[in-house]
Amino acid sequence: MWVITRLLSSVVLKGPYRLICGHPGPLPGFELRFVHCTRRRCGPIPAPDAVDMDALYTQEQRAVILRVLNTAPESELVTVKLLRGRKAANILEHRSRHGPFKDLESVLHVPFLKHRNAVVVFNSILNPGETTERKKRKTQLVKFIRPEMTKAQLKASSIVSIVCGTNKIAWAHMHREMTVLDWQQQECSSFMNGTYMASSYLDDISDVVSNLPPADFYVVEKTGVSVHNVTLFPVMAHLRTVEAMLFALLNQRREVGALPKVLNMLRTAVGRHFDLMVGESRTSGARAVRRMMTESVTREGPRVTFPRELLLRYRGAFQMSSRSKGEELCDALLQAVAFYELLAE
């Protein structure tokens, strides 16, 4: 209230003149208007999540949900949406300590299962097939390529999938028959080393571009690092710098009006395709890559075919005990596989 009084005391209106802070003068074009002020009674504002969970479902639905949460083993719980990883373990631990859940409200005592997440879990238990079908349809319809292009325009005999890390760039050259033609990575000493020197970045990225094989498209991973995450801003600035230079160097001979040769592919789309997403975060794809490499040798019609020399070179690169773990190499390969498989759907 004292703020309003202070402001009113400094403004005096009289005829066509106004005295502001003791300085009179005409203000053409202004007219006196009335401002209606309302008073709102102060009081506690109810939380948006303060809803009785049991009231949202019928008695039969509650019985189905509680039966799954109270009896399902971990192998079954992880198939429910949002229950992968630690959440399923937390449910088992809560059951062993406190006994079975008596109502849906008691589920909220499980760590990381608050109101919004709990509703998603309950709905997934009630409609598992519908959730899976919706997720599949969403993946098919999502525009995972930037700039947006039709499937006919994206037909390619081969692509080079490129993934940037904090100190290296990896790429996978893949034929449309799902055969890996080239697969390697290159260290970049200037990346995130002190200040972001454009000339140093350009030298490293130009060297990488000179080693890339020719292809119909170059597909660069588009990460989902938020600009609002202050702690990750240096990483975001680094990735955007590398991405912009790759687009410029690889597109420099593009004719006006021609289709773009360099594309972005959303990292989250690749994660959903290989079921690597936990919430909004993507987990490692090393296990999926190891499985593809094994199937290339053991199966007659493998998902991906690797040359023998690449299998020998990377046979131990993606183990958990590996020093580098080859995350960029994994991501480059998975992006290439997802590109062709999503287009085929």
Image (cartoon, helix red, strand yellow):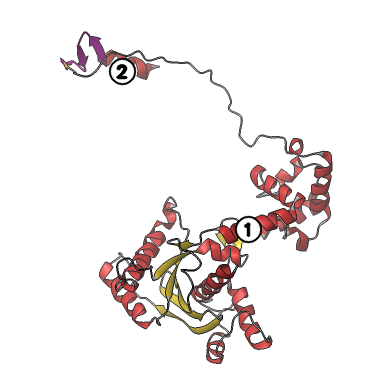
Q: Position of residue 109 (x, y in %)?
A: 71, 45
Reading the image, the residue beneath label 1 is 137
Q: Quadrant of residue 292?
A: bottom right
Amino acid type at mark 1: Arg
Looking at the rendered structure, the kind of residue marked 2 is Leu
Q: Residue at x 79, y 52 (%)?
A: 69
Q: Residues within 10 Å of mark 1 (few under 14, many from 20)?
A: few
Residue 182, can we see it? yes
Residue 177 drawn at (x, y percent): 56, 81
The magenta-colored residue range is 11-25
Q: Quadrant of residue 298?
A: bottom right
Viewer-side label of 1, 2: 1
Instruction: Assess disc 2: are there few (<14), some (14-19) or many (≥20) residues with their C-alpha within 10 Å of its C-alpha.
Output: few
In the picture, the quarter occupied by the C terminus is: bottom right
Q: Quadrant of the N terminus?
A: top left
Q: Position of residue 311 (x, y in %)?
A: 56, 87
Please give the residue where the numbered disc 2 appears in the rendered image: 7
Q: Which residue sits at x=35%, y=13%? A: 34
Q: In the rendered view, would you say 27 is above or below 71? A: above
The picture places residue 303, in percent across and down from the top left corner, at 62, 79
Magenta stretch contains residue 90: no
As drawn, 40 above or below 154: above
Secondary structure predominantly adopted by residues drawn in magenta? strand
Residue 40's place in the image compared with 166, above or below, is: above
Query: Earlier along the polypeptide chain: callout 1 or callout 2?
Result: 2
